[in-house]
Amino acid sequence: MTDRFSDNPDPGKPDDLILDPANLDAERHALELKFGELLGEDDTESLRELAMGLSPGDLSEVLRFMNVEDTARILRMLPPDPLAEVLSEIDNRSLSVLFTLLDIDEIADIIEEMPSDEAADVIGELDTEQAAEVLAAMEETERIEVADLLQYPPESAGGIMGKEFAICTEEQTAGEAVAVLRELDEDDLEQTHFVYVLNPEGKLVGRLPLFRLLITAPDAVVRDVMEADPLYVEVDLDQEEVADFVQTHDLISLPVVDSGMEMVGLVTADDVMDVMEEEATEDMARLAGVSKEEFGEQSSFRVARSRLPWLLGAMLGQLGAVLVMSHYEQSIETMVALALYIPMIMGTAGNIGIQTSSVVVRGLATGEVDFYHLGRHLGRELGTAFMTGAAVAAFIYLISWLISSDPNLSAVLSFSMLLVVLFAAMAGSGIPLMLHRVGIDPAVATGPFITTANDIVSMVIYLGLATLLLSLGRGA
Amino acid sequence: MTDRFSDNPDPGKPDDLILDPANLDAERHALELKFGELLGEDDTESLRELAMGLSPGDLSEVLRFMNVEDTARILRMLPPDPLAEVLSEIDNRSLSVLFTLLDIDEIADIIEEMPSDEAADVIGELDTEQAAEVLAAMEETERIEVADLLQYPPESAGGIMGKEFAICTEEQTAGEAVAVLRELDEDDLEQTHFVYVLNPEGKLVGRLPLFRLLITAPDAVVRDVMEADPLYVEVDLDQEEVADFVQTHDLISLPVVDSGMEMVGLVTADDVMDVMEEEATEDMARLAGVSKEEFGEQSSFRVARSRLPWLLGAMLGQLGAVLVMSHYEQSIETMVALALYIPMIMGTAGNIGIQTSSVVVRGLATGEVDFYHLGRHLGRELGTAFMTGAAVAAFIYLISWLISSDPNLSAVLSFSMLLVVLFAAMAGSGIPLMLHRVGIDPAVATGPFITTANDIVSMVIYLGLATLLLSLGRGA
């Protein structure tokens, strides 16, 4: 912090305090302690100065770990404009708690300062009554924009787009297009890199990058200098597909149109990054059997409530394995050594299930894997399963021979292990692809489905084969 | 595809074929089949037309699933400029195979057309000798840029930045800054949204958004109209921290400076999206015990080779559990029912380990969790563990009582389950935070570490308690 500060030609200017990206956690923690100290001393002036000296992004990160009351005290010191920027970075639960401390007009003033997409997200988090009151207290222009955005599902193009974009018509001149820019707020201009071009019917037909306006004569007609047929998406497209589209075409912003090709919003790179982060969190959460809402959640009770269904579901699956084992109880009684290797067989099946299914789940998200190449993917996994299966079979042969000194048991173990690995690999890669095909998010069902299938099948294979081949138990 | 095509005012123009983002997989697969058909008929003219009609992003996605020979046949039909764009989207392994089919001058010509950052990535994938030959065959300007980029680690700011950016000095006028833009290639201009401003010593001191140039008088001095003290990162910063910085501050591009504050490159939003995708894949891969290189890998052998160490490592861990069980073999012999519940205990411990560790790993990536709030996070997890532990303990009591009708066994099972859940939760959340603290990527070691610890400890708790409380085995 200090080094970068001293690089600064005008260190007295408070908005120059940018945290060192190489050491963020430590710097943010130091600031959190500093805020805590000043709050304790009730030193309003220093608190305000410190808060205003931070960029909105950094301040929101520092506040993330503070309690709602302290957060509210600090935020109320900020003028509406930086405050709106900080609030649009804060997670929505803290925000709604915070809003219980403010009156409707204060909230409306703050929300008016926010970019329209973030304003809509915030209002979407309020309860219906409060949302209506806040909307009613807002100025007309902002109210109409936000009300328009609120009608789209949050996870669609309409749910992530903003209403801040510049338009002109194809018959205007380059000079007139520049005049459009002059009309915009400075804040909106910051995010403006293209002027979008409409035909006389109001349909989107082109875009003008600002550099082209700079190097074009002011009397040139927009139609002749625009880039025709710009990329766009329709307003109801799922946000994940919007993000893929932006990535495939390396865009920094993407116009959103309605079914009549009228431009209704603009998705920007920062919206897409938020979607990517959310979707990656969601996929990982689902594979691990937690809900994405739990990230940042502070209440143990809510976390437990969200994790329990998954844990109990998995136990029901394991109950299947328990019943299979109790079916073969006599075999185990005859040869207790059988039980020793159960953790290794089940554990390996579980690991193969996680490996294969996570490759499919992530591959579906990045485009590496799709249902049309199911056969090829399963073929690759089958080949892999034969090789890894042979290796782990040899390993368990060796280990069991060293521990139990029974070559017959070792033979059964290694043969079972090979079959278990083949099954686990096919289930782990096939099940998520099938789920995806029928429209179920593969990450949702993958964990419990595959774990259960693997637990039960691996016990049937192992104990069944052992009973049969070692002439144990009921069959003997 | 057809609907969007007919929306198009000039459907004869081949570069208008944009795939419908709502139905990408199916449309890409249809195109892949079409290419296959044309390749079979050896219809060069239609192949070229189809390939040139697709955007580079879509074409690279369609080629992803084709074999290298067919890919090479199609790509050799394209002129250098679109070819370079397609190649920069293709994964690097296919690219190096493809290059074995081309001669050095052809490769150099193609690479010269690429953005410098992607050119450097491609050359970085070649073997040292071929890389040197290609560099030598390139024109000087491009060679110098690419050679400069090659000196930085691939996962640093220097490794992802490009050399395409516009600069002016603070003493120049706005009109002169516009003249700088006129000098740039049209291709480079596409990505230019700011002109960066240097002081007389060549240090970065400001940036000029293009909109400001548009609404400023040409004779205004740059110093007076620029945004001073722009955000920047240093060239050796890790790419993940660069991505966090861009996200925190909602940037679309970020200048990169050396230790003397001289601007050496520019990171753009598409670079950051690539990093985010790579890092999310990497985290998920590590948690699941696969390597990120495996994504898109077609060889079963290479996949097996990369998965085996993790599987065998986990088996070594499970060996610990096997040894614990064999230590208590006499207890199991006395009461075979004990063995039945091992899958449920170990499975639940494993699930809790995955839940808690994935929350930490993902939370560290998104900033929800850090080491400075270790105590708070562990406290939350402990609270959660008590609640979930009580629930699963009650569940196993019920199940075991129904199956084994032995209230003492059920009591031991449920008490063991509670302890196992508490341990698994603390290990699953504490271990990755500790690893992160000492500079080890928590995702790398989390899987095997936690699985092993859970397997062993859960067996010690369960069988130890059973032996003690049920007066079984050696102690009896």
Image (cartoon, coloured by chain):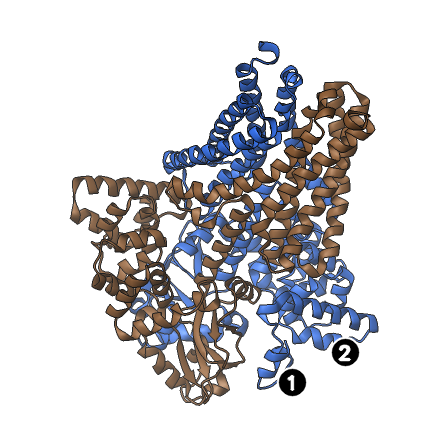
Chain colours: A blue, B brown
Q: Position of residue A329 (x, y in %)?
A: 66, 17
Q: Which residue is mark 2?
A: A45
Measured in 3D between alpha carbons, the distance from the residue under mark 2 to the one under mark 1, in whole angstroms, is 16 Å
Q: Position of residue B141 (x, y in %)?
A: 30, 75
User: Which label's residue is closer to the chain start, 2 or 1?
Assistant: 1
Q: Which residue is mark 1?
A: A12
Q: Quadrant of the C terminus of chain A?
A: top right
Quadrant housing residue A381: top left
Q: Amino acid at mark 2?
A: Glu
Q: Amino acid at mark 1?
A: Gly
Subunit under mark 2: A
Q: A461 left or right of B434?
A: left
The residue drawn where x is 73% and y is 28% is B396
Q: Nearer the viewer, residue B319 or A263?
A: B319
Q: Are marks 2 and 1 in contact (CB under 8 Å)?
A: no
Q: Secondary structure at mark 1?
A: loop
Which numbered tag is attached to residue B316? none
